[in-house]
Image (spheres, grey):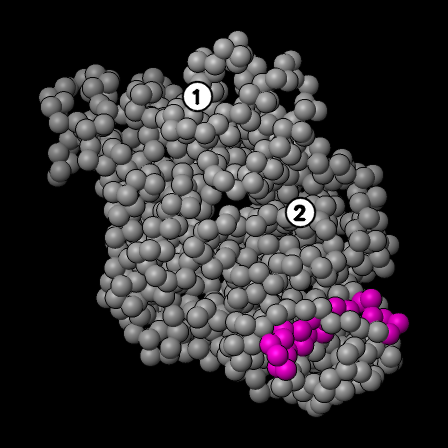
Amino acid sequence: MIRATYRVQVREGVGFEDVARIVPHLADAGISHLYAAPVFAATSGSTHGYDVTDHNGLDPTLGGEAAFEVLVRALQEAGVGLILDIVPNHMAASMENPWWRDVAEHGQESRFADHFDIDWAAGKLTLPILGKPYGEALAAGDVRRSDTADGPVLSVPGADLPIAPGTEGIADVDALHEAQHYRLTHWRLGRDGINYRRFFEVTGLVGARVEDPKVFDAVHRLILTLVREGKVQGLRVDHVDGLADPAGTLGRLAEHSGVPILVEKILGTEEQLPPGWPVDGTTGYEFIAGLAALFVDPEGLASLGEAYGDVADADAERVGEEAKELILTRNLAGELERLVALALRLFADDRSARDHGRATVREGLVALMTALDVYRTYLPSDDPADREVLARARAKADAAPLEDKRILDDLVALMQAPGPDAVRLEFIRRLQQTSGPLMAKAVEDTLFYRYHRLVGLNEVGGELAPELGPERFLAVASEGGLAATQTHDTKRGEDARARLYALSDPGTLEAWSKVWHTLPGDVPPKLRWAMAQMLFASDPITDDPDFAHRFREAALKTVREAKEETTWTRPDEAFEGRVAAAAEAMAAARDRLAPLEPVARAGAVIGLAQALLKCIGRRAPDVYQGTFGWDQSMVDPDNRRPVDFAAEAALCERARAAEPATLLADWRDGAVKARCLLEGLALRRERPQLFADGRLETVPLSGREAGRFAAFRQRDGEACAVVVVPTRPLALLEGEGIALSEERLDDLAMSPGVVLRSRLAPGELDAADAGLATMLAAFPILLATSW
């Protein structure tokens, strides 16, 4: 049973033997499973491992098979399982990938040609890897014939490409290139001219056809062997929405593996995983959204929105629709045109729809796909939820200024039409495989960098206009899957986000206004607002000499992802220079954040609360590497920086030994947060059935400050674990630390009353009397048990 996971990022100096050394620390902390980033062979210098070159080989940079065995032995000796992150959706479109190289050499005759999602009817394999248009590259000598130990190749900057058998004798470089099964092109053609499915808009990652049983077997051979040998006890499936047939692929994986499966999947507010998926749940992005719903104050959020409206467009829905249309028509232009062509082929045989022209179909697709409110549907299926999604999109798209709105009904009919028609099935599949990247790139990677009312809400799986309140948290915390507070893909560290939740307190607006107006930097007001929130969230508790550089890089990523004044592919160097200078000036003027110092302390209390809450709800809490202590990190790659695991283990030892009063007095060192996690994890280890079979419930509180708290209990019969956390702690802080005022809480009580034993502050209390005040003054959150 997965009881608690610890996510570790391998690579960049962290190999299997390095991870093996931290296993005792994890076992002592109550972690049941190590949860590792992809470990299979990836492109040279890969920092993440999602660019797999060989699904059936462990990456030699991690130490290879021998070092992996060292890790496996360490895990087995400690009784800790291993969950591996696998990437069935795609592989690296790199000549380091032997399958891809073989396809480049032999074209459609390659034995791996059908392993990849390539449209061979569109002609030669398109390789958009040149730094300039082909003719210019040829004239500049960037495309040339070279002789290697393995024979002649076509060399371009950064890659050597194989030559098709029988073409070795061609001496002219251009003629040699034209005789190959591939076509070298400028990298910009990747936007709308390639003939293979890519991951999102990354042309360096090519889609794999794991819906084909033969390809499934080839991709999963090693991982299933490791499962059968007892070396792997769980799987995390990356980008499940990219798969052509998620249900079929997951079903096959479950049948052959027999271990728990978690999926990386973004769920909307009302969305559930499709029925019948044989999985244990998601990796937990929606849990983060649930925490935001609990800790963000609706009144304060509205006030921030009014103030933000004075400097920017505060209509998040309109900004989001603009972002979706931009991404679909520009960044995903090739995918859109493929859908247009398929729809026209299908309409040609329909006398009621064949008069739609290309422009009409294109406009209709843009309107319908922009209106989708989930990442994808899973048609063809019998699930009414899919039809409801399409119905909502159709209704919303009706507001678009289309020349002929009948196209919307005809497109919806294509999506819902039954039957085995191959072209129709391809249209349905490709639209669904495109809607996920559209949502991800438009919302996560555009809207969230354009709209900045409260950037703590701009999180993977988050919502800019969330449903707020404990009911939303309870709903997601009661589901299966991981309870995550931070991942390698989150926009900021969990404690940075907690500070931003505290900024939504209605009492912060005056201080916030003073801060964001007075920070230095020559940037537009909207960006100054965003950068000020970023600075406040990430301001390190202890000194960090690299902070200015880190903050500058995060600011530059923000404006490039926003795709307004500058972009990754069309940079405005003058504007980016202003942003970089402003970031450095702000980092040097962090003393001007002083008016928000109490808010930062309130954020620390919220950080403790969310650390504990993930231990009380869901199937298993997930601890991201290095986050037993405070984590104020920024967007990746900042949140993937190397972790001092020895220091983290020492922090946990200090946290176990210290008295609560000492932990509170020294709160800045992070041991107080480690203590919260350790107690929560220990409770789950002691009472696994309580969390496996119990039910999560809200617990009513009474008293004049009851509205500033939330209480939950996990109950199984007479046994229960209770958590009480302040959700609006700013007005309750006492002194200069993170302790709460006992006087403000003297009438706080829990109903119904039970005798509880506290695990964070010593003693017992009858929760019906005012003993809660004493407990919460001794420690600002409560974890107590009764059985």
- Name the image quarter holding residue 421: top left
| Quadrant, the C terminus | bottom right
Query: Of callouts 2 and 1, which one flags the residue occurring earlier in the amino acid sequence?
Result: 1
Q: Is residue 61 above or below residue 543?
A: above
Q: CA distance from mark 2 to mark 1?
A: 33 Å
Q: Is residue 470 above or below residue 76?
A: above
Left/right placement of residue 76 relative to residue 746 reads: left
Q: Position of residue 361 (x, y in %)?
A: 54, 17
Picture coordinates of residue 634 (x, y %)? 59, 54
Residue 750 on the magenta segment: no
Residue 717 included in the magenta stretch of the image: yes
Which of the 4 quarters of the picture holds residue 316? top right
- Mark closer to the observer (2, 1): 1
Q: Residue at x 48, y 14 (%)?
A: 350
Circle 1 sits on which residue?
342
Q: Residue at left 20%, top 32%? A: 110
The quarter of the displayed image where residue 395 is located? top right
Q: Residues within 10 Å of mark 2 (few under 14, many from 20)?
A: many
Numbered label attached to residue 463: 2
- Residue 288 lies left or right of residue 17; in this view the side is right
Write the residue at 84% across / 57% down.
506
The amino acid marked with disc number 1 is: Leu
Please identify the dominant SS of the magenta region: strand
> Residue at 33% across / 79% down in the picture?
77
Numbered badge on residue 112: none
Tell me the kind of residue under disc 2: Glu
| Residue found farthest to the bottom | 763
What is the x, y in percent for residue 473?
A: 67, 60
